[in-house]
């Protein structure tokens, strides 16, 4: 994804699909425990079978997988368009629906990208983040259907229901981050040790288990990358995704200098990763 964004100075779905066909699908066989890294995710396995075995076009493929594969690969899109919410939402939506066609998965994936964009802009992950996201809904910059009035209050008497054509059915995926952030700072809500948040929100792979714990940890450890990552990992279950998505949100808050150097030094292909990250930061689109 990062290479495609750099080469095209933006999201180019045709180029990205070509890369999947040539650089990924040639290395997998549809078996879960095979492929780069020793595992191939559910939605990718299904689309592999549709593309390679059934010879379907990219416009015909997709799966009902409720996991986080789309978020994982659209992180770079959220960075590229962090200051352009319309392009962010459109690009992430299109990429998500290549492999996962469920609207709920789509809405939660776009919402995570929108949260990440807010943090890149310097906004805090706190109880007010959803109010800021809803302002983008009201301005037409984020594609979510909403009937609430200002301040997330009930609809005004007699107000008409706006058209929801082309929009996600509800803004709930944008509202939940604020609740998790509030829980992380509320002295009456105690989760100790913090890794037990995985018990609270669930340890399975589904997106609706992963994101609440991710938002909680990223808000609680907003300036402590190491603690956030370790608690995400120690929670067990789908801890790779929990750590990846938590680390992304905390990283957006602390910057590269806030990541322990030994974490960076221990990366496989460190030099290539750092070079790609630098190139991606250079093409961030700022209005």
Image: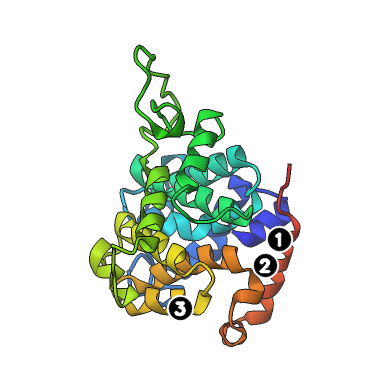
Q: Is 15 on the left-hand or right-hand side of 249?
A: right
Q: Residues within 10 Å of mark 3 (few under 14, many from 20)?
A: some
| Marks 2 and 1 close (CB-CB < 8 Å) | yes
Q: Earlier in the sequence, mark 1 or mark 3?
A: 3
List the residue tagged with mark 2: 277
User: Which residue in the structure is indicated by mark 3?
Assistant: 227
Q: 11 or 208: nearer the eye?
A: 208
Image position of 225 with respect to 78: above or below: below
- Dividing the image into 4 quarters, which one contains the C terminus? top right
Percent coordinates x, y for residue 169 in the rendering: 36, 32
For image coordinates 64% across by 48% down, the residue present is 81
x%, y% of residue 26? 50, 66
Whether 268 is drawn above or below 55: the answer is below
Residue pointed to by mark 1: 281
Mark pair 3, 2: CA separation: 23 Å
Q: CA distance from mark 2 to mark 1?
A: 6 Å
Is residue 91 shown to the viewer in this render? yes
- Tell me if residue 170 comes above or below residue 10 in the rendering: above
Structural crowding at the residue carrying mark 1, measured as other residues with C-alpha within 10 Å and reported as few (<14), some (14–19) or many (≥20): some
Check disc 2: other Cα within 10 Å, few if <14, some if 14-19, many if 20+: few
Name the disc covering residue 75, or none: none
Q: Earlier in the sequence, mark 3 or mark 2?
A: 3
Q: Is residue 42 visible?
A: no
Q: Which residue is drawn at the image coordinates 72% and 51% (left, top)? A: 9
């Amino acid at each position: 994804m990062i290479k495609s964004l750099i080469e095209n100075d933006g999201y180019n779905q045709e180029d990205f699909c070509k890369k999947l066909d040539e650089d990924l699908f040639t290395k997998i066989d549809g078996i879960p425990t095979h492929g780069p890294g020793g595992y191939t995710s559910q939605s990718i396995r299904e689309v592999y079978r549709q593309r390679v075995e059934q010879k379907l076009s990219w416009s015909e493929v997709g799966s009902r997988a409720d996991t986080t594969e789309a978020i994982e690969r659209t992180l770079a899109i959220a960075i590229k368009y962090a200051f352009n919410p319309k392009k962010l939402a459109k690009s992430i939506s299109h990429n998500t629906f290549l492999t996962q066609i469920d609207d709920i998965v789509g809405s939660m994936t776009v919402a995570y990208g929108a949260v990440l964009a807010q943090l890149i802009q310097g906004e805090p992950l706190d109880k007010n983040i959803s109010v800021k996201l809803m302002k983008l809904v009201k301005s037409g910059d984020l594609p979510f259907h909403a009937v609430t009035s200002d301040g997330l209050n009930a609809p005004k008497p007699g107000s008409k229901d706006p058209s929801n054509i082309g929009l996600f059915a509800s803004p709930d995926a944008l509202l939940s981050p604020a609740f998790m952030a509030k829980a992380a700072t509320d002295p009456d809500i105690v989760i100790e040790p913090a890794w037990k948040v995985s018990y609270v929100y669930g340890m399975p792979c589904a997106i609706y288990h992963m994101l609440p714990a991710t938002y909680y940890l990223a808000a609680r450890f907003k300036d402590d990358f190491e603690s956030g990552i370790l608690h995400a990992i120690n929670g067990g279950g789908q801890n790779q995704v929990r750590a990846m998505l938590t680390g992304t949100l905390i990283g957006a808050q602390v910057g590269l200098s806030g990541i322990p150097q030994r974490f960076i030094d221990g990366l496989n292909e460190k030099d290539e990763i750092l070079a790609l990250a630098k190139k991606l930061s250079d093409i961030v689109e700022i209005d």
